[in-house]
């Protein structure tokens, strides 16, 4: 098909197609998006680079998509030039919120499956999300050029999942471009025209935003009803704030100013506002004069799965960290945070994340984009503690654990889906049982592939479950999970005491069976990290008043017998007794100073920090 430049004026809804690409990690979403950009002519061969829509350094280094990216492409079919608005979405389970927002801005989705690997856990999760949004789904097999590809086998698997004929599953290669043009034709043919009332007051949904140092907040919107044009005054319906619309345009794939945006179009707005709280994802934008009275539905708020404290190593960086989090929340709507103070680490923030990868990415973005040095504390999940007097306390940090008598403790559980070759069933069951998992069911997708469904405590999977699963299945298993309420469990708070005093920063809430292991590990770690004092220092791990583990840091001793080169033994004993009394007095008045490096190493998950503190 021919390609033709698209004018920046508002496009009629019947010529617009809004779609996104959903898939498991590493099934070739970004590569297919690259080929579409080239074939439709919005990026010429000279400017082309791999993963063109992945703008962040972290995305390019790790080879993963973290942020959804919208782009407008022209495509001509039967003499009419259509406007295709594509959103490339992340594949990792931690960024499902990005995917859900992208699906709400589209009428259709390309479900992409690697022809060499087949359906995986996140493929199913994203398919169910798309079905919840009533989207038209186009099944596509990618990477058909690989020697290991089995397109016929996986086309049947995919057809059985969606309920179509295997011949309807399109086969493409994002790398070579084979089959991409017929796919673009099918997008025009199958995906519905966006619905909306062009004569109604303007209503546009904010699905993303970003902070630009020079231009302020740049807001990305999908127009549902009416139209928006430059220089008009607009209102944010949740806050009632009114702004002048300085620039309006489309992303193709670089921003291009336009004469306006009509029903079904996706574009950006710039108002020059520098206050990051004025543009909230899920808010409705309308005209200030004769605007809409009813806001759009918005998005379901994300629920954090893991909490961790982030503290600047230099205390004076606290205001910079606060501003950095405000700006990052614009670009990452799943971020939830509140100020927190630690006796050991000073001022910082308690931040809710959707998973461990989300935590890693946010910390890395804060350090790179805002030039901060940060320490993250041990991640923990949210517990509901019921006391004997029927009061309920929500605990996101072990230091918030109540002192009264506890009747029960509830922990969050997840419904996990594991897809793997059937030869690894025994290894997966063994791993899930050691993590207190309960098998819900098992289905064979084919004679060689099995889907296992488990209920697992969230606290057991946030650390290293995925790594352990990959090593037990030689990298073949895929894993996805979603919240599934709470369960009562036999949990205890393990305190760490230095010379009889509790150090809140080292406390943790663990299952009773694993409490001894945690206590021994933390006591051993601290023995290596805390420098020796003039007196003996006991390090103890305790559950309530019961000590479960102990290590001693030996005192630094002066050799008081060096001057005794002869004489009676009683003289030596007298000197040793005198030294012993002095050490005893010193222990009563002495306090243990824990160096900052030791705190960082004990609370950090980085092996480098531990080695640095030992030196």
Image (cartoon, rainbow, N blue to C red):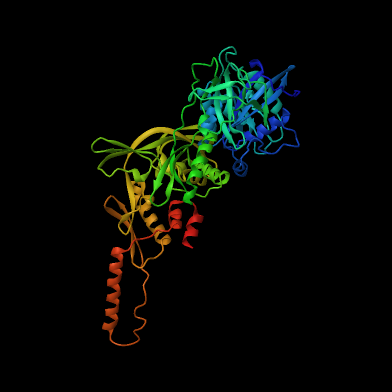
Position of 465 relative to 205 (above/below): below
Q: How many marks?
A: 0
Q: Position of residue 309 (x, y in %)?
A: 44, 45
Q: Residue furthest left?
A: 389
Can see residue 597? yes
Is 283 left, or right, of 29 in this rendering? left
> 566 or 431, which is in the foreground?
566
- Residue drawn at x 49%, y 55% is 609
Question: 321 or 242: which is nearer to us?
Answer: 242
Left or right: 30, with 451 as reference point: right
- Residue 420 location (% of width, % of height): 52, 38
Q: Residue 161 appears in which quarter of the rendering?
A: top right
Q: Quadrant of the N terminus?
A: top right
Q: Nearer the viewer, residue 576 or 477?
A: 576
**Residue 246 vertical position relative to residue 375 in the rendered view, above or below:** above
Which residue lies at the image location 76% right of the left edge and 37% below the top edge?
46
Q: Which quadrant of the structure image shows residue 53?
A: top right
Q: Position of residue 244 (x, y in %)?
A: 58, 24
Q: Give percent across and percent down for residue 539.
A: 34, 59
Query: Between 60 and 483, which is closer to the camera in this rendering?
Result: 60
Taking the view exactly as shown, the residue that stands out farthest to the bottom is 567
Does residue 512 appear in the picture of this structure?
A: no
């Amino acid at each position: 098909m021919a390609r033709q430049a698209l004018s920046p004026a508002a496009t009629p809804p019947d010529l617009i197609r809004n779609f996104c690409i959903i898939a498991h990690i590493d099934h070739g979403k970004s590569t297919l998006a690259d080929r579409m950009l080239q074939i439709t002519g919005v990026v010429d061969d000279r400017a082309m680079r791999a993963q063109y829509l992945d703008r962040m350094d972290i995305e390019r280094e790790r080879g993963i998509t973290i942020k959804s990216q919208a782009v407008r492409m022209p495509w001509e079919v039967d003499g009419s030039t259509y406007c295709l608005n594509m959103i490339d979405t992340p594949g990792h389970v931690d960024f499902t919120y990005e995917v859900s927002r992208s699906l709400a801005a589209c009428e259709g989705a390309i479900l992409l499956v690697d022809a060499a690997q087949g359906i995986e856990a996140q493929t199913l999760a994203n398919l169910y999300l798309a079905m919840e949004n009533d989207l038209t789904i186009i099944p596509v097999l990618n990477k058909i050029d690989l020697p290991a590809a089995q397109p016929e086998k996986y086309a049947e698997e995919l057809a059985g999942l969606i309920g179509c004929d295997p011949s309807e599953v399109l086969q493409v290669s994002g790398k070579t471009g084979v089959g991409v043009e017929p796919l673009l034709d099918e997008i025009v043919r199958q995906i519905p025209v966006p619905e909306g009332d062009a004569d109604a007051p303007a209503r546009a949904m904010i699905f993303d935003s970003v902070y630009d140092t020079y231009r302020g907040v740049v807001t990305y919107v999908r127009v549902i009803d009416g139209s928006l044009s430059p220089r008009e005054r607009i209102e944010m319906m949740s806050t009632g704030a009114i702004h002048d619309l300085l620039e309006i345009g489309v992303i193709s794939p670089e921003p291009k100013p336009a004469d306006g945006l009509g029903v079904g179009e996706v574009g950006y707005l710039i108002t020059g506002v520098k206050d990051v709280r004025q543009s909230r994802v899920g808010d409705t934008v309308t005209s200030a004069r004769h605007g809409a009275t009813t806001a759009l539905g918005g998005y379901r708020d994300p629920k954090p799965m893991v909490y961790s404290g982030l503290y600047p190593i230099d205390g004076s960086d606290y205001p910079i960290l606060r501003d950095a989090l405000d700006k990052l929340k614009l670009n990452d709507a799943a971020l939830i945070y509140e100020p927190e103070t630690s006796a050991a680490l000073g001022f910082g923030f308690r931040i809710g994340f959707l998973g461990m990868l989300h935590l890693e990415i946010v910390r890395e973005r804060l350090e790179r984009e805002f030039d901060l040095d940060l320490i993250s504390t041990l991640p923990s999940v949210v517990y509901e503690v019921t006391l004997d007097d029927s009061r309920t306390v929500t605990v996101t940090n072990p230091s918030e654990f109540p002192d009264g008598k506890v009747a029960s403790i509830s922990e969050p559980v997840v419904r996990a889906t594991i897809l793997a070759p059937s030869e690894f069933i025994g290894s997966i069951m063994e791993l899930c049982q050691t993590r207190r998992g309960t098998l819900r069911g098992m289905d064979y997708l084919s004679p060689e592939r099995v889907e296992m469904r488990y209920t697992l405590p969230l606290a057991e999977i946030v650390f290293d479950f995925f790594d352990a699963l990959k090593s037990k299945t030689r990298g073949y298993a895929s894993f996805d999970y979603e919240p599934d309420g709470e369960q009562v469990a036999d949990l205890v708070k393990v305190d760490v005491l230095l010379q009889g005093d509790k150090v809140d920063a080292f406390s943790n809430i663990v299952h009773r069976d694993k409490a001894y292991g945690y206590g021994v590990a933390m006591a051993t770690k601290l023995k290596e990290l805390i420098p020796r004092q003039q007196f003996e220092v006991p390090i103890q791990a305790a559950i309530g008043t019961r000590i479960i583990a102990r290590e001693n840091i030996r005192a630094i001793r002066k050799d008081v017998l060096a001057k005794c080169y002869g004489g009676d033994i009683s003289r030596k004993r007298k000197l040793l007794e005198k030294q012993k009394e002095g050490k005893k007095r010193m222990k009563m008045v002495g306090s243990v100073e824990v160096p900052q490096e030791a705190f960082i190493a004990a609370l950090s998950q980085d092996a480098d920090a531990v080695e640095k503190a030992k030196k």
